[in-house]
Image (cartoon, rainbow, N blue to C red):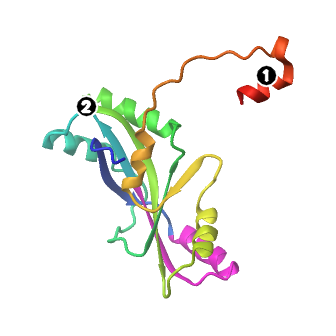
Amino acid sequence: MVNWRMLILRGAPALSDFRVNKLLSSFKQLGLDINDIYAEFVHFTDLDEPLLEPELNKLNALLEYGPRIPAHPPSGHLILITPRPGTISPWSTKATNIAQNCGLQKINRIERGLAYYIETSSSLSSTQLSEITSELHDRMTESAFDSLESASALFYKESPKPHKTVDVINGGREALAQAN
């Protein structure tokens, strides 16, 4: 389900030349034929309603940070790394707080991701993509997506389930297994 309230804003380049070379070296050791890699921050904003132009300008000014290296139009295979859906990163908490304190009350939450663009001379197999993705993110705290729109999962809210109790004192392990 696409969240129509999600605003996607490109950010600054995220990798220094040193980090790019380190990743390319890692990929080479894995036997992957990667020509280049480019990464930039991407900001995902969950809104109550669309921002007016002055509000959007203020948000863009707040989200201007990072290395001062030249950005370029991204090309190649996209691998988007974000915090795991269902979690709220410390960065998100602080950024949302700052935006709301600056008068941007239409913003429910801002989250940040890293968009990696992998350039190759041939197409990548699913196994190769998996190897690349595992080099770029921590499965315990982050998720990988193949499109920017997929990040709408960050803002999905599920209604709480009704409270249940399991009588483990009288039912023991069997009661727990049955409830599971």
The residue lying toward the viewer, choosing from 148 and 118, is 148
Q: Point out the tag, 2 or 1, that comes first from the N-terminus.
A: 2
Q: Residue at x 53, y 57 (%)?
A: 144
Q: Which residues are magenta?
A: 17-41
Q: Check whether the beta carbons of the residues at disc 2 and disc 1 lie within 8 A of each other.
A: no
Q: Amino acid at mark 2?
A: Lys
Horizontally, residue 57 falls left or right of residue 92, namely left
Question: Marks 2 and 1, how far apart in space?
Answer: 46 Å
Which residue reaches farthest bottom?
A: 121
- Secondary element at image label 2: loop
Residue 20 belongs to magenta span: yes
Across and down, in percent, residue 136 comes to 59, 62
Q: Position of residue 165 (x, y in %)?
A: 68, 15
Q: Which quarter of the figure is the C terminus placed in?
A: top right
**Image coordinates for residue 174, horizontal then vertical, percent:** 83, 25
Q: In this rendering, is residue 58 above or below 43?
A: above
Residue 21 lies in what quarter of the image?
bottom right
Frontmost residue, 153 versus 118: 153
Identify the residue at horizontal 46%, vertical 31% (top origin): 158
Q: For residue 106, which numbered disc appears in the image?
A: 2
